[in-house]
Amino acid sequence: MSLILGIESSCDETAASVVLDGCKVLSNAVASQIAKHAAHGGVVPELAAREHLTALEPVLQEALSVADVTMKDIDAVAVTQGPGLMPALLVGLNFAKGLALGNRKPLIGVNHFLAHIYAAFLESGNNVLTDPGAYPLLALVVSGGHTSLLLIDKDGNARQLGCTIDDAAGEALDKASKLLGLGYPGGPIIQRTAEGGDIRKFNFPRPLTGAAGKPLAPENLYNFSFSGIKTALLYHVRNTPEMDRTPEWLRDTAASYQEAVVDVLVRKTLSAAKAFGVRSIVVSGGVACNSALRERFTECVPKHIGLHLTERKFCTDNAAMVAGCGYHYFKKELFAGADMDSFARLPQITKVPFL
């Protein structure tokens, strides 16, 4: 049995978690900074880094206490190496380095993007990893920083089929909330506001789907773009007199806008699934919490394809996914040295560590 301690600080969540054998989550402590960043309408990197400095030690102690273990029981320390906000990443990385060095534990650097995919297999879904019939597997990672499709084979080889060429879906939802004067964080607020709204009331664009009647370039078949949807919303708001911005108008606007985002995500994913004959689809990342998105995937994914929606508690940034993914690095003895550095951008992925 192996106990991995995970540390996460890639954005505005400070988190620590203890996971047994890459699957059983013994603790998952998270300190949120939403209240701190709400006044700014988004995450301020320098502010996030300062908050991580004060939150990491209490979060660590909570994770160890809930798991009923000490650092002596821990086999390795796994930490988010990137991608993310550099000031925030560096705080967590240096904290993990000191923790590992001081307690003579191996240090593991984990790719945050891959950890989001792995989150779908925590606790109940780990058996999917060892099932040859589950591959090829298509993973949609959709969050504030990522909207990407990764095709994974049973031997662990992987390739990115597409990604966003401008804004991520989560960022588009956040900006929509700001444009509508609803507050931060935008995703959950847009979802609540959209409840009971008419998804067909307003016609927002579906970029890079060919819906506008223009031929889609081959290189954009599985790419995403959400900047055009945001611009359409901006003009929609500007062209609506204030006296006409009723509660009903707001509900219908939020519902129609959310529908456009969901439609693009599901349409692109299912198109890739058909083209590459996938046997499983994984949906992960913060936007995977969205009820409309989850319902649409549940309705539309063909019966012969296994659908794995990440549990909501593991969708947003957390350290359980870091510790769980880190376990597979640990088994392969893929350890990092004291000179390990963070990276802000997602590197090219050709292999996943958990297969």
Image: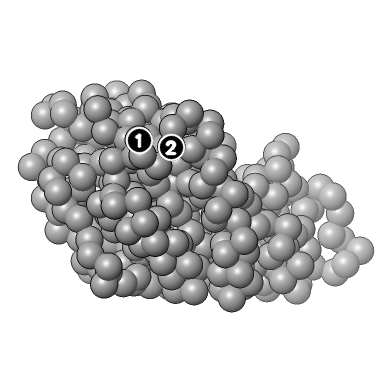
Which disc, if any, is residue 70? 2
For label 2, the crowd category at 10 Å Cα-Cα, with few meaning under 14, some 14 to 19 and many 20 or more, is few
Report the front residue among 186 and 207. 186
Relative side of 228 to 150, left or right: right
Specify whether residue 11 is in view: yes
Q: Secondary structure at mark 2?
A: loop
Residue 311 visible from this viewpoint:
no
Instruction: Place residue 253 in its image quadrant.
Output: bottom right
Q: Residue 235 got which mark?
A: none
Label pair 1/2, CB-CB below 8 angstroms: yes
Q: CA distance from mark 1 to mark 2?
A: 5 Å
Q: Which residue is identified by label 1?
A: 73
Residue type, mark 1 in image: Asp
Residue 29, given in percent of the width and then of the height, sits at: 54, 41
The quarter in which the C terminus is drawn is top left
Name, please, the residue furthest toward the right.
Answer: 243
298 shown above or below 254: above
Q: Residue at x 28, y 41 (%)?
A: 75
Mark 1: few/some/many CA within 10 Å (<14, 14-19, 20+): few
User: Which is more toward the observer, 207 or 103?
Assistant: 103
Q: Is residue 88 left or right of residue 321?
A: right
Amino acid bearing label 2: Thr
Residue 127 vs residue 247: left or right?
Answer: left
Q: Position of residue 22 (x, y in %)?
A: 29, 34
Asked whether 203 or 158 is in front, the reply is 158
Q: Position of residue 168 (x, y in %)?
A: 46, 63
- Image coordinates for residue 80, horizontal then vertical, percent: 37, 57
